[in-house]
Image: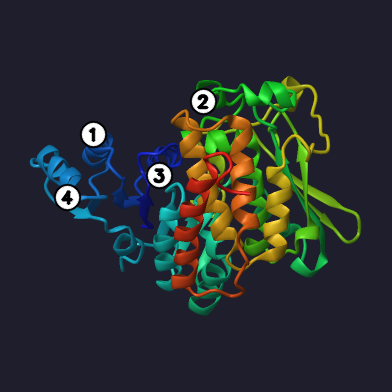
Amino acid sequence: MPNIVVLGSTGSIGRAALEVAAGLGSEYRVVAISARDSVDLLAEQAHRFHPRYACVADEVAAQRLRQKLRHLAGTEVLVDGGERLAELPEADVVVAAMVGAAGLGPALAAVKAGKRLALANKEALVMAGHLVMGEARRRGAEIVPVDSEHSAIYQALLAGRRSEVEHVTLTASGGPFYRCSAEELSRVTAAQALEHPTWKMGPKVTIDSATLMNKALEVIEASWLFGLEAEQIKILIHPQSIVHSMVTFVDGSTIAQLGTPDMQTPIQYALTSPARRKGLAAALDLGSVGRLTFEEPDLERFPALRLGFAVARAKGTSGAVLNAANEVAVAAFRAGRLAFSDIVTVVERTLNRHTPLPEPDLPTVLAADRWAREEAEKCLTPNTCS
């Protein structure tokens, strides 16, 4: 019976992971769940799945959770225990569904413990890909991506050897504003940015998809996850979100993974691979889709992509800086402190003030993260950051 830990179980990916686990039946058991402070939903999940542990970020939330679980036997409430859950001896698969830099510590803990890491938290690799992948190799841990694009590449790579890969192509829906002019982009509101035309995601990831920063993060993630140079990664805008990504081999063959835009499919594959099981997502009907279109991205209107490739080349601490600055800028946009079109500007200005340090250890990565947050805050105010 595979035992599953779902970190970030109250977010969109975490909720989907629990539904997938339930759909797989009694063979799969959820042994631990966690959230930052969504106590009500976490309590509902605990009553449904009866995990051994339920974890929240602070003691105030823990007290509320204990009260809600007072009649539930066998579930212990933990505080700030994400890394402890990631290395539980009884855990077989750790689903890393947290958003942002908070996912780095648990991801590292999971691979150090030799677990299968079902990775939805791309920030762990963006910030410290060399550390996470290095520990995975040393400990024999398996990292199976949950992002639909990286899951597609992971699956397509089974058609050949890694040494035979010419390049990979990440697809992007383009988000809700891809056809907008620069002037229109400057007037985008937070409410508008939170309406994605294809995918249902959390607020931060939805805004990243609108700026295409999410795709920039995916470029960096792919470079670490699959051992690719930046020049081996391409992006195509594909509004239908049916072709999730492609791998082109040296003989000219291109293998693509297609499916309906439903995160349950890549989540389930991360839990069951290499086996495939009947899933909850609807099967793809290409006849009803009708047409699939692709085009090159516009790097002028969406400069986040340019930054993603630059960081994939620079490596070192640049990934931690890009991610931290983007988290600050997105939070400022959601709070009404920053225009949509200035999100990437703040990130770029912060990157320009940083000299990447190669092969950083974890304290150095975390120091770069803190520095970038402080610098990005300065860059929110005109004329204080150039």
Q: State the image coordinates of residue 121 (x, y, percent, origin top left).
A: 49, 51
From this viewpoint, is residue 336 visible?
Answer: yes
Query: How busy is the neighbourhood of tag 3: few (under 14 within 10 Å), some, or many (20 plus)?
Result: many
Q: Earlier in the sequence, mark 2 or mark 4?
A: 4
Secondary structure state at the residue bearing disc 2:
helix
> Residue flagged by tag 2: what amino acid is it?
Ala
Q: Earlier in the sequence, mark 1 or mark 4?
A: 1
**For the point 8% across and 42% down, which residue is it?**
70
In the rendered image, the residue lying farthest to the right is: 251
**For the point 14% across and 40% down, which residue is it?**
64
Closer to the camera, 204 or 256?
A: 204
Q: Mark 4 points at which residue?
A: 59
Q: State the image coordinates of residue 224 (x, y, percent, origin top left).
A: 64, 63
From this viewpoint, is residue 217 visible?
Answer: no
| Alpha carbon distance from label 2 to label 3 | 33 Å
Which quadrant would the N terminus be assigned to in this image? bottom left
**For the point 27% across and 41% down, which residue is it?**
37
**For the point 53% across and 33% down, which residue is it?**
338
Q: Which of marks 2 and 3 is nearer the N terminus?
A: 3
Vertical relation: 158 (above or below) 283? below
| Alpha carbon distance from label 3 to label 4 | 29 Å
| Alpha carbon distance from label 3 to label 1 | 20 Å
Q: Mark 3 points at which residue?
A: 21
Q: Name the residue under label 1.
A: 40
